[in-house]
Image (cartoon, helix red, strand yellow):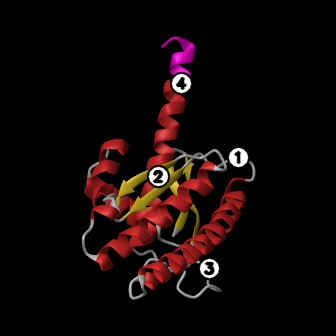
Amino acid sequence: MAVAVTDSAGSPSIADCRRVELADPDVVDSAQPYHAGLELPARDAKKTVDRLVAAVERFSRRSVGDLLAQYGGSGRVVGIGLVVGSDVDPAAIANDHIRAHASEGRLFRRVIEEASAERGLAAEVTVEKRLYAEAAKRLGKPEPQLKNEINALGRGLERPWRAEEKTAALAAWMVLASRGQRAESTSRRARGG
């Protein structure tokens, strides 16, 4: 889920909200490339997974690139906020099925980070279960207030305003706020303040 947040008179507002496909809909099993290799012999599994991962890399580079071009053709994108389910290294997970899920999460995270970096944008990664606590610190607002404000941001949108849209919006707001704080800090340093 991609949500573009702008700063309107010191308050965030939603500029765009859409689903961005990272897996190629024309390549069977590309949505879960590591799962596709679970029941195969090791050699066949590696070939299958490698082929599917390459398909995800190609497709996502294009889809994320297109999105960023639409959002920031004039250099308006200041950063990427990326919400992930976990930051656990998939190699540390003993269960094959859970490791496959973690590997897919890591793959989709990596392709977004790489596509962003190709355009000179850093991705700020936050684990979903820590998102509101980190946002409260960064934005200087209590979590209940943030939840109310995020809920209110979705009013008037034509699409549903579910948890994934809300977390994407909050991550974007955090990036926007940190870029504004850095710019203000840089400005103060430039003035000798």
Q: Do the residues labelled 3 and 1 touch (CB within 8 Å)?
A: no
Q: Residue 27, how many percent across, how many down?
A: 62, 85
Where on the picture, by quarter, is residue 58? bottom right
- Check disc 2: other Cα within 10 Å, few if <14, some if 14-19, many if 20+: many
Q: Is residue 40 placed above or below 33 in the rendered structure?
A: below
Can you identify the residue that label 1 sits on? Answer: 75
2 vs 3, front mark: 3
Contact (Cβ within 8 Å) of mark 1 with mark 4: no
Picture disc at residue 173? 2
Q: What stretch is highlighted in magenta?
A: 187-193
Q: Which amino acid does label 4 sit on?
A: Thr
Q: Earlier in the sequence, mark 1 or mark 4?
A: 1
Can you name the residue that lies furthest to the top here?
A: 192
Q: How far apart are marks 2 and 3 (CA)?
A: 29 Å
Q: Position of residue 82 (x, y in %)?
A: 46, 57
Q: Where is residue 138 in the image (x, y as percent from the top left)?
A: 36, 43
At a point 54% along the width and 66% down the height, the residue shown is 2
SS class of the residue under badge 3? loop
Q: In this view, does 28 lie above or below 164?
A: below
Instruction: Give the residue number, with chain letter if any, for mark 4.
Output: 186
